[in-house]
Amino acid sequence: MFKRRKGLAIDLGTTAIRGLSLTKTARGVGIASLSLSSIPASSEEREKAWKKTAQSLIKETGATHIVISLPGRGVLVRFISLPPVASGKIESILQYEVQHQLPFPLDAVVWSYQILSQEEKINLLVGAVKKDMVNNLLNLFTGLGVRIDFIDSDTFALLNALRFSPDFERDKTIAFLEIGAESSNLLICYNEQMLVRSLTISGNALTTAIEEVSKIEFSEAEEKKIKEGEAQFPTLSPVLENLITEVQNSIDYWRFTQKGPEIKKFLLTGGSSKLAGLKDFFTEKLRVETISFNPFANISYSSQFKEVVEKESSRLAVAVGLALRQI
Ligand SMILES: Nc1ncnc2c1ncn2[C@@H]1O[C@H](COP(=O)(O)OP(=O)(O)OP(=O)(O)O)[C@@H](O)[C@H]1O
Ligand SMILES: [Mg+2]
């Protein structure tokens, strides 16, 4: 029997799986379905939990087509500018460029590109990922009766969410940092110029600092971090200083390689951006106004989604960017 196409974006994170489906409405874009399910903290249990949760999510929503993403740290992303060339030639030029950037043979990776603009120059974003990473991700969904429309990366999804939001101003330099549990992703963009970086410091590093100083279990330290927030700053600040250094190094690299104006605003997202006092810490250290990113600013939703959106919007930016691919 003919099955109606039903899209669903799935963000498989370290701490939770998020499912989001967006739909076109008379006034723009609205939420059709949304859920966030926590998964166990241990890495041994993670893949099993991903598979089980994804399976029930697909069943509950009746999804037929999904979009998923790879963590930013597993994907090589480069911004490349080419002089005007025939479109048939782009691929062979990029193939050479990708091989040049990779420490392993080209046939061990899958790669793709997106044209950002074509005026005097062709500006492109190129992404490459190891085939075995993609296969591991695909294996999670075999036998679940869905088609995979697209495999994205967290960083591209974040860029998509940013470009859809009112916070995006093409002619201003914007920095956008997502701090998750195991990964942090940084984007800096101005017009079509872009820097994409995965950073090493994120929420788990903060929890580990409390675990070590207070000599308690990871789960207790996690609770302490969330409950006490700013009161834990003496313990957390060395880790946060390292994060600022990583961000500052990327900003310095941006300044060195791109000719754009100084960063106008700094947007924070990801669950760890909820840490009390973090925005002020960033504003003070980077001397740039730092604000929370709202991925739903241009998306309407009914009251049934209000609670999750309001409580968890910082943990849903990747899901929004993915779901936007399907409408
Ligand atoms: N109020 C809070 N204060 C500090 N940290 C918080 C708070 N709420 C959540 N976090 C942290 O946010 C992180 C989870 O964020 P998020 O859901 O964005 O990560 P994830 O997508 O599951 O992980 P990843 O993308 O790294 O795989 C955890 O490290 C958690 O401790
Ligand atoms: Mg995440």
Image (spheres, rainbow, N blue to C red):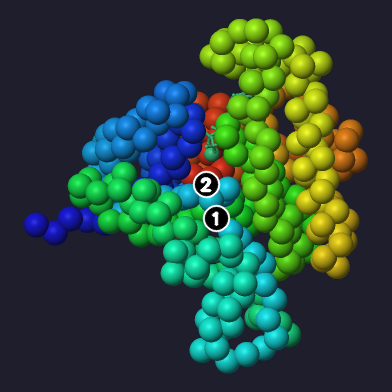
Q: Which residue is mark 1?
A: 75
Is residue 229 visible in the rendered image? The answer is yes
Front residue of this view, candidates 199 and 158: 199
Residue 315 is situated, as x and y percent measured from the top left of the image, at 55, 35
Quarter of the figure with residue 256: bottom right
Q: Is residue 46 left or right of residue 309?
A: left
Residue 164 is situated, as x and y percent measured from the top left of the image, at 60, 55
Q: Is mark 1 within 8 Å of ligand 1?
A: no
**Label annotation for residue 71:** 2
Q: CA distance from mark 1 to mark 2?
A: 7 Å
Front residue of this view, candidates 289 and 298: 289
User: Residue, x 83% and y 45% (percent of image)?
Assistant: 248
- Check if mark 1's residue and mark 2's residue have beta carbons within 8 Å: yes
User: Is 26 located above or below residue 193 in the figure?
Assistant: above
Q: Residue furthest front?
A: 104
Q: Is residue 111 left or right of residue 94?
A: left
Tag 2: residue type?
Pro
